[in-house]
Image (cartoon, rainbow, N blue to C red):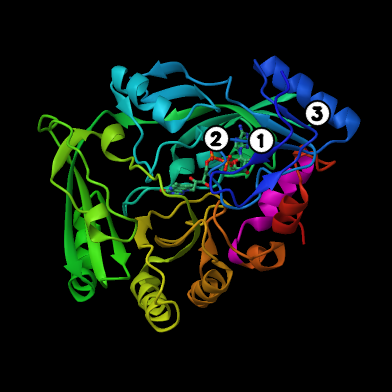
Amino acid sequence: MSRTVSWSNWSGGVSCTPQRVEVPESEAHVIDLVRAAEESDAVVRVAGSGHSFVPLCATDGVVLSLDNLQGVIDTDPDRQQAVVWAGTKLHQLGEPLWRAGLALENQGDIDRQSLAGAISTGTHGTGVRLGNLATQVAGVRLVLASGDILDCSATTEPDVFHVARLSLGALGVITQFTLRLVPAYRLRERTWAASVDECLEQLPTLMQATRHFEFFWCPNTDTCAMKALDPTDDEPTPPHEWPYAPPGHVDRYVGPERVDWSYRIFPSERSDRFNEIEFAVPASLGPDCFIEIRRLVQERYSDVTWPIEYRSVAADDIPLSPAYGRETVTISVHQGASLPYEDFFRDVEAIFRAFQGRPHWGKIHWLTARDLRDLYPEWDRFQAVRERLDPNGRFLSPYLRELLID
Ligand SMILES: Cc1cc2nc3c(=O)[nH]c(=O)nc-3n(C[C@H](O)[C@H](O)[C@H](O)COP(=O)(O)OP(=O)(O)OC[C@H]3O[C@@H](n4cnc5c(N)ncnc54)[C@H](O)[C@@H]3O)c2cc1C
């Protein structure tokens, strides 16, 4: 069924007027829509929850939403795997997986994204031994530009699988994932405030000793809100109200200790809209990179009150993953959605680039294929698969061409 002819993202910073927004009812319907687009030579972009800050989903062709292809199809507690529709929102996953005794190994700050959207940009949480969501994928089912279905895994079509785990919607429409899961677990959340000196001194130990450690630097008080999550067998604590504090205020991130199942502990509420730039830098350079950005904020952008978030991600082997081949620290810089951000973010980007940074694919940056190819050793391997699966560029909008084609 066709819906409206406008589309915009979560932050309001990206909008487009496609020919159609289609919400297919079934995988067969996805195939029909892709074949029709091929016949009419329309670009197809799949939109998840529209939580990317850049125009990954924007097109004047056809926007596809998989909001009717949601839910857990099958769970296999013995193999610790589940087959899930790609349009499932992360918040729809926790309960059914928990009933099967399973859970995602790690999650990011919120759970409003679609599974396919989060995986396709390398969305991540924090934890030195834990990879991004794309590393939790054991199988991908794609509708190709030809309308054919391709199932891939480490043993079936391994060349496609190797790159399809993080592919920006550039290979086809992903309809299902097989996820690699872990037994359901509870987490204890501890939060506390620390000075920047204390934070940086304790950082190496906290990162190594905690399953999930991160901190938010709050510029207006030059204080860090520290957050540690560790597994526990303790019973869940009763939910408590988290009083409102504005973004960048330490009280927003520091509260009483609590215990709950992992999928209830990971997500936070993000009701204030913002724009964001985030780069992944080699873990060993993380502290110095943070110190440079802090200096920039204090010297040139002292009116910025939004926090800077510092997390870690394990190295992986996925060609377009920002954590490809290196232990990684991610640093995220925010600005309110109604405030100008370009000068600030461009200055931040220059620092990230000096620290060998790779941009988060879903967040603001100004890099193009010419810059990006040098950052990714297996860039050509991704391109070869993309050209083979989508020779006519059915899934390439102008923005995707800028990102992927030299
Ligand atoms: C409030 C907020 C909090 C965030 N927190 C984090 C965080 O903690 N960690 C982090 O790493 N990132 C975070 N992000 C970034 C966010 O996770 C990514 O931008 C993610 O891609 C958004 O998911 P989505 O479902 O909205 O995808 P969209 O933005 O809608 O799409 C992202 C990409 O996925 C592709 N895609 C979507 N569905 C399919 C499909 N079925 N088949 C093929 N391609 C598809 C799209 O074409 C596009 O290229 C956050 C963003 C916001 C706004």
Type of amino acid under label 1:
Val
Q: Are marks 2 and 1 in contact (CB under 8 Å)?
A: yes
Q: Assign a secondary structure to mark 3.
A: loop
**Left or right of 292 in this view: 375:** right
The answer to which quarter of the image holds residue 39 is top right
Q: Main secondary structure of the magenta part?
A: helix
- Name the residue carrying label 2: 116
Q: Tell me the crowding category of disc 1: few under 14, some 14 to 19, or many 20 or more residues within 10 angstroms, Cα based.
A: many
**Left or right of 276 in this view: 368:** right
Q: Are marks 3 and 1 in contact (CB under 8 Å)?
A: no
Q: Is residue 113 above or below residue 343?
A: above
Q: Is residue 377 magenta?
A: yes
The answer to whether any part of residue 288 appears in the image is yes
Q: Assign a secondary structure to mark 2.
A: helix
- Mark found first going from the N terminus, 2 or 1: 1
Type of amino acid under label 2:
Ala
The answer for how far apart the CA atoms under marks 3 and 1 are is 16 Å
Magenta stretch: give its range. 375-388
- Name the residue carrying label 3: 146
Residue behind label 1 places its C-beta within 8 angstroms of ligand 1: yes
Q: Assign a secondary structure to mark 1.
A: strand
* Relative depth, front residue between 115 and 156: 115
- Mark found first going from the N terminus, 3 or 2: 2
- x, y percentage for residue 196? 23, 73
Type of amino acid under label 3:
Ser
The answer for how far apart the CA atoms under marks 2 and 1 are is 9 Å
Q: Is residue 311 above or below residue 288?
A: above
- Mark found first going from the N terminus, 3 or 1: 1
The answer to which quarter of the image holds residue 181 is top left
- x, y percentage for residue 54? 61, 53
- x, y percentage for residue 406? 77, 62
- Name the residue carrying label 1: 46
